Image (spheres, helix red, strand yellow):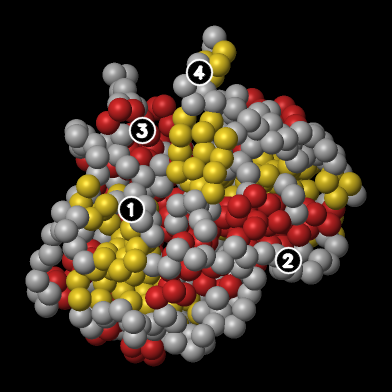
Amino acid sequence: MSLEKFLGSLHSDSDDFKPSDWEVDWDDAPLTYKLYRNLPVIPLSPELPLSLYRYKSPANPDLTTIGHILWHVYGLTRINQLPTYSSMGYTGSPVQMYRRFVPSGGGLYPNELYVYLKTADAPVGVYHYDAAHHRLVLLREGDFDSYLTRALGNRCDISGCFGTVFTSVMFWKNYYKYNNFAYRLQGLDTGVLTGQLLEVTRRFGYESSVYFQFLDRAVNHLLGITDQEESVYAVIPLSAKPTATRLNQGIVELAGSSAVELCRELPVIRHEHYVRSLEIKEYPMLTKMNEASMLDSTSSFGYVKAVKHVESGLQTVFMPRVDRLTYDLASVCRKRASPESNFVLSKVTQSEVATLLQEATASLSYNNDLNGNNENPISRISLYCCLYNVDGIPNGAYCYDSEAHLLRRVRPGDQRLRLQKGMSLDNVNLFQVPMCLHVVGDKDYHKSVLGYRGYRIQQMEAGMLVQSLLLAASSIGLGGRPLLGFDPALCDELYQLTDQGKTTLIQIPIGHYRYRALLEGSLHS
């Protein structure tokens, strides 16, 4: 299968990717976290803050602060048991899962976090965040400011950053269940994780930027991971200085460093780690896509000039001006819910819809390496929605204009039946949902500028928007359920996206819900 056909097919039902004889071996499933063996470790403080409002950061971040950040981003936060059902009713075999503050497709958490750390109370070097034990594992000791600066195209002052976070994907961790459809999920999961990281670091008062473009093999080489098993998707420098992490275009090396040159500067490291699976199947399309997406020279870095498309002649609904939300992030993360059959139809207000849309799209204004010199870039993704029973807004399908803060109605009337017919699974009753939001992006994922890497970047930005939306929903007492089991072609026709060269990336029903039967315990002090 060609790469182009593979990416085009990813938006069909996930079952299309599974061979007819594909069976999930649940007994040989991998762990949801990576465990290194026989390496130096630094325990992180188990005394974690139970509330997280915005506050001023300390001048010199220490290990305690780093531990608080990593735990709120990707630590194990709770354990739960869910009853399982079949066509015959309750099976009597509950499923036990370790959960984190961020959602993940199937609860499989394919990502890992690494950090290049420079603090006074730990050796300078590259670490893996061991989520299972809430500790840091030292992978490579030393000062790598120059190496990492060049791997980013000399666009960031790494010497002014106290830490740099790397978000990676371990391919097998969700391929074992989803087969090739895992490629789409991995981009979305990485985006959700990145969105959480940006929000948490803001709460601690630190500056951050997301670098989607870097010399992949050089960064993977620094961490000691192999491209056939795992690969870094984003690099996020952290600093207490307002400008240290931001893109510096004045000194970008357009024909400078190459991955091969950088890799020669450091010895190869390969550390033993535990996966648990005894048999790891091959995933050739995932490694082929990863190979095609890699950047070997800084001259391949590019910038995206997004163009805003404004529909004319559509009925508009002006949204009320609402204040930005202020909330305890830790509390909101704890109570975040992903309802399925337990949505309950109840009226929501126009102000609540305005708050959700405003909060979600505000997250798109973040520091990254795609916008170039544009101070106010047009977002590469946007929000559309189908509304029903919303106080003050007629039923219909709308696109949201974030700059004007208004809804443009594309189709009038109740669209729930159309959306329900487009579901591939009956796990959510959309007739019980007042808001069904859709994240929309360019169908060609800016391939002319970003190549095949543009696809995973688009999925990551969609995931970042989804995480912001879920946090906003939780803060006002609503639940949201991200879904990929829907018909994008139906939604594209509903919103008249085809002529715009756009497509629907993910569907998120949002509304009131009843709590489901669940045995849950917290995993923090």
**What residue does disc 2 label?**
325
Mark 4 or 2, nearer chain start: 4
Mark 4 or 3, nearer chain start: 4
Q: Residue at x 51, y 79 (%)?
A: 206
Task: Evaluate if marks 4 and 3 touch, with contact meaning CB atoms under 8 Å apart.
Answer: no
Q: Residue at x 65, y 56 (%)?
A: 332
User: Dot 4: what SS?
Assistant: loop
User: Dot 2: what SS?
Assistant: loop
The three-letter code of the residue at mark 1 reads Val
- The local crowd at label 3, few if under 14, some if 14 to 19, many if 20 or more residues have their Cα within 10 Å, is some
| Residue 416 visible in image | no
**Quadrant position of residue 7:** top left
Q: Which mark is residue 92?
A: 4
Q: From this viewpoint, which residue is outermost toward the top?
A: 88
Q: Which mark is residue 316?
A: none
Q: In 3D space, how far apart are the residues under numbered discs 4 and 3 (Cα atoms)?
A: 23 Å
**What residue does disc 1 label?**
169
Q: In 3D space, how far apart are the residues under numbered discs 2 and 1 (Cα atoms)?
A: 32 Å
User: Dot 1: what SS?
Assistant: strand
From the viewer's perspective, is residue 235 above or below residue 350?
below
Mark 3 or 2, nearer chain start: 3
**What residue does disc 3 label?**
177
| Residue situated in front as seen by the camera: 104 or 372 | 104
Q: In 3D space, how far apart are the residues under numbered discs 4 and 1 (Cα atoms)?
A: 34 Å
Q: Residue at x 27, y 52 (%)?
A: 35
Residue 52 in the figure: left or right of residue 32: right
